[in-house]
Amino acid sequence: MRFIKNEDRQRMSISKTKLNYLSALASVTCITAALGALVFYFLLPEHYFNWYPFIPIYFFVLGVFSIYMFDACRKHMPKKLVLFHLALKIIRMIFSVFILVLYCLAVRDHIREFMVTFIIFYLVNLVFESWFFLAFECNRKRKKENVKIA
């Protein structure tokens, strides 16, 4: 590690916010996926559909994309962070509706189960992201106030 230049080390490092988000996202995704799998396996085995594993993977990948975009916005356009966060939410909603429609038209198997499961995952991820970014903004605001006081 001592042969790597300092500038390269800074480019390779991951921000604390991004690391916290990714670990929390992985935890939420794993817990939600496991709970869903348990429900399908023990309570509703006749409603299990082959595309179930796609749903947690989809939301995890979307979350990773979101945090990288959020981090880039935080570095390059910090004053537009809230607007950017809302724009990401709208893009995610439009893309999710597209996925639902595509599934209904292309796969046509267990449509109701897929839609309900997808919507539950969507809501869980919406609550998680809203909580995370609200905590981030409150933390950022508190740090600004502490700097002004000192």
Image (spheres, rainbow, N blue to C red):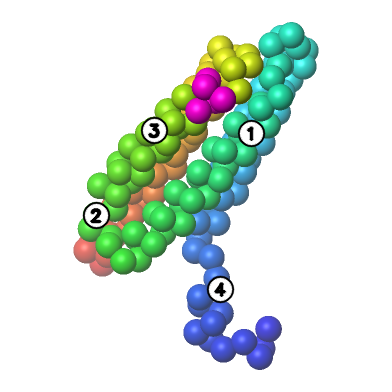
Q: Main secondary structure of the magenta part?
A: helix
**On the rendered image, what quadrant is the C terminus found in?**
bottom left
| Residue type (three-letter) at the residue carrying disc 2 | Lys
- Report the Cα–Cα distance between label 2 and label 1: 32 Å
- Report the Cα–Cα distance between label 1 and label 4: 30 Å
- Which residue is rendered at x = 70% and y = 28% of the image? 34
Decide if residue 91 is on the left or right side of residue 37: left
The disc, 2 or 3, on the residue closer to the chain's N-terminal end is: 2
Local secondary structure at mark 3: helix
Local secondary structure at mark 4: helix
The disc, 2 or 4, on the residue closer to the chain's N-terminal end is: 4
- Report the Cα–Cα distance between label 2 and label 3: 20 Å
The disc, 1 or 4, on the residue closer to the chain's N-terminal end is: 4
Closest to the camera, between mark 2 and mark 3, is 3
* Part of the protein shown in magenta: 102-106
Closest to the camera, between mark 1 and mark 4, is 1
Q: Which residue is mark 1?
A: 54
The numbered dot on residue 93 is 3
**In the image, residue 72 above or below residue 97:** below
**Quarter occupied by residue 94:** top left
Please say if the residues under marks 4 and 3 sit with CB atoms less than 8 Å apart. Answer: no
Q: Which residue is mark 2?
A: 80
Q: Which residue is mark 4?
A: 12
